[in-house]
Image (cartoon, helix red, strand yellow):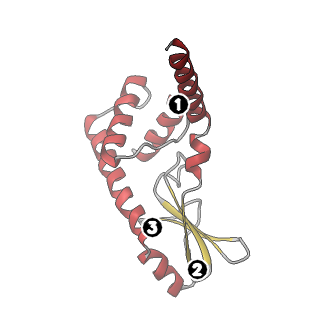
Amino acid sequence: MKKNIFKSLIVFLILAMSMSVFPTVVFAAGDLFEVDGYDCRLDKPTSGPDTNKWHVHVNDSKGREVGVESVDGSPSHKQTLSRVPNKTKAKIKSHAKWKKGVKEQAKLDKATAQIKSRGLNLNKTGDIIIAIAIVAAATLTWFFPGDDIASWGNLLRVITT
């Protein structure tokens, strides 16, 4: 009996440790899809000044990035989809993955509004924890902007400014 409990504990600890090491690797890839020979990837928000929204990367058939745009149409990574043909751009924006990003961004915008309305100080750990709970509850997902409270603080400060 004690051996089984010990083995279970070891397995649990290994899994818990691997989740603390690998979440940014596992979740960084985004949702992949293809439109008219272009490889597209829907990414979750990150803590950069222009990557704090759901956004789509578009690569041509040679793997070169030809555009990145937030699902609300604003630039992401200092780019838009202006180099993507209009016909293809329209198909990308009507794709189910793009629409998923639009829905998720709306949830994140709602969470951002809640954080702002509460007047949370995102330089305080306690307020960051409250803001994390608001984002997790509003989006029904768990973002992995990083493995520590400082990374969360950076993301929260960016989405609320």
Q: Given the image, on which type of amino acid does mark 3 rest?
A: Lys
Seen in the image, is 159 located left or right of residue 46?
Answer: left
Residue 98 drawn at (x, y percent): 44, 68
Q: Disc 2 residue type?
A: Val
For image coordinates 50% across by 38% down, the residue present is 154
Spot the residue most to the front. Answer: 1
From the viewer's perspective, is residue 117 above or below residue 103?
Answer: above
Q: Looking at the picture, how far across and down is residue 4, in whole percent?
A: 52, 19
- Say whether disc 3 or disc 1 marks the residue closer to the N-terminus: 3
Say few, some or many: other residues with alpha carbon within 10 Å of mark 2 (under 14 / 14 to 19 / 20 or more): some
Disc 3 packing (10 Å; few <14; some 14–19; many ≥20): some
Residue underneath mark 2:
84
The residue depicted at 29 percent of the width and 34 percent of the height is 119
Depth check: give the residue in front, 16 or 112.
Answer: 16
For mark 1, does the 10 Å Cα neighbourhood hold few (<14), some (14 to 19), or many (20 or more) residues? some
The residue tagged with tag 3: helix, strand or loop?
helix
Determine whether 93 is above or below 54 in the image.
below
Identify the residue position indicated by label 1 in the image. 150
| Mark 2 vs 3, N-terminal side | 2
Q: Is residue 92 left or right of residue 136?
A: right
Nearest the viewer among 127 and 25 is: 25
Residue 18 visible in rendering: yes
Q: Earlier in the sequence, mark 1 or mark 2?
A: 2
Mark 3 vs mark 1, foreground winner is 3
Residue in the image at 60% along x and 33% along y: 18
Element on which disc 1 rests: helix
Q: CA distance from mark 1 to mark 2?
A: 36 Å
User: Mark number for residue 97?
Assistant: 3
Residue 138 horizontal side relative to residue 6, left or right: left
Disc on res. 130: none
